[in-house]
Image (cartoon, rainbow, N blue to C red):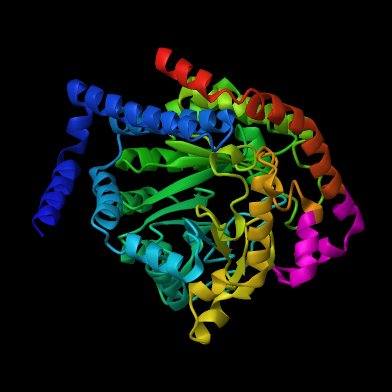
Amino acid sequence: MANNTLLRMGIDYIARHGQSIAHNPIARKLIMNQAMKAAENGYRANLQAEEYPIGVCRDRYEMNKAIIYTAERILTGPHPIANTYIRKLSEIMIQNIAMDGGYVSAQKSFFNRHGQRPPGLLVVSPTKSCNLFCTGCYANSGNASEKLTWQVFDELLTQAKEIYGNLFIVISGGEPFTYKDQGKTLLDMVEKHGDMFFMSYTNGTLIDDATARRLALTGNFSPAISVEGWRERTDERRGKGTYDKILVAMDNLRKYGVPFGISLTATKYNCEEIMTDEFIDHFFFQQGAAYGWIFHYMPIGRSFTTELMPTPEQRLKMQQRSWELVREKHIFLPDFWNHGTLVDGCIASGRSNGGGYLYINWDGKVMPCVFVPYAATNINTIFAEGKDLNHVYEEPFFNDIRSWQDAYRKKNGSGKHGNLLAPCFIRDHHDVMREIVARNEPDPENEPAREALLDKEYRDSMIKYGKDYQELSNPFWEEHYLRNYDYKKALAELENK
């Protein structure tokens, strides 16, 4: 009890004085040095374990350093985050982990039942409704009646904590800020679950001054605003005037110290534009984005043409360029398809070695991934039958995918890792995806998903894309990640740097 009291006092002190501590040069230097030493120690431990290729260890080290620099930037930059966020993050991470506020015990119970770690997070799309109609959007925007009920949404988050031990929830859409049920909104739900942290993908156009102020008071929600490029590209896909509305939203968020990020959808036509120094500098260092996510266009929405996808050649260049940006600009910018080295490959279906996720959409369908539109079960049915998220995890469709993931990572015991630059279940191994879908017969999310299974041209083009990219990236994977397994040399270079 005494230790808990001291920890709570420490949390309160950090929350009240976090910004002044961050602006104290001596304190900041001490904290940065300790954080960098921890990242270096982690890198050293990974090299000593000789479990992962040296290139994978290096990628993780570089991203860890970028996270540390990001934290310093949002604490000490011209628009520092509100103290409410420091308090909330302290409470969530320290109370629930160090003090075992349910997080650790839930994960232990899950492991005892399944022999595996639980999914690391859930992605939830509570509504199909959206105020925009973007070209090729996978969400295929609907109306306000297509949504999770408040009770189901609430129970889903409660069980995510109590059964999976999740503290972090990703909200997708539709447009999340249009969610409303029984007179309650998304932010009402966020406030109710104040012991969790939420990140939401959003078009940003509904973040007015009052919404930004409420987010700052809540302290446990960060919006990731979708941007397609400069004004012309963004307005071309999202509608005229959208780019300017995004800038207004960012103004509002900076005003109240709300940390926000950007979400970039890379296509064949904008993938070079969104990775230029000018574009990155504008959104990270002028607009103040704390982080960014890169998603490659996935043809599963209203139109499943592969025409918009970055070509295999563009994709490999993006992989190399993304690491240049992380190393040189120290920004947190994961590429969902190119940075499999950070997360051990595919993370769909709640992956058996932890860190994965499951996706629940607006009508309750539970799918392995946002980009794999085939549902094993429905959360509405699960709850109505008195079952819970344990039963969701146990679905054969998800188990089948997890078995393939394990075999791919281990290369069936060959001693080499599968190419983590091409780990995606549906994009890089579309033929495997179809085999697993055929065996399990999951429910297609919608009619386009059903038609995609029957479309020979779509099937052939997706399989060809995956094979072309594997052939292109395999030599790079071999050269920069697998070759020269000289861990002692890498350790010596670390010590002498």
User: Which residue is drawn at the image coordinates 8% and 56% (left, top)?
Assistant: 2
Going by the image, does 368 lie left or right of 357? right
- Residue 355 on the magenta span: no
> Which x, y percent locates residue 369?
62, 58
Residue lying at the far top of the rendered structure: 496
The image quadrant of residue 351 is bottom right
Please give left or right for residue 349 compared with residue 196 in the image: right
Q: How many marks?
A: 0
Q: Identify the residue at image location x=19%, y=44%.
A: 15
| Residue nearer the viewer, 102 or 223 | 102
Q: Measuring 51% from the left and 43% from the top, which residue is drawn there?
A: 245
Q: Residue lying furthest left in this view?
A: 2
Report the predominant secondary structure element of the magenta stretch. Answer: helix
> Where residue 97 sits: x, y (%)?
30, 54
- Look at the image and give the residue range highlighted in magenta: 432-460
Residue that protrudes farthest toward the bottom in the picture: 385
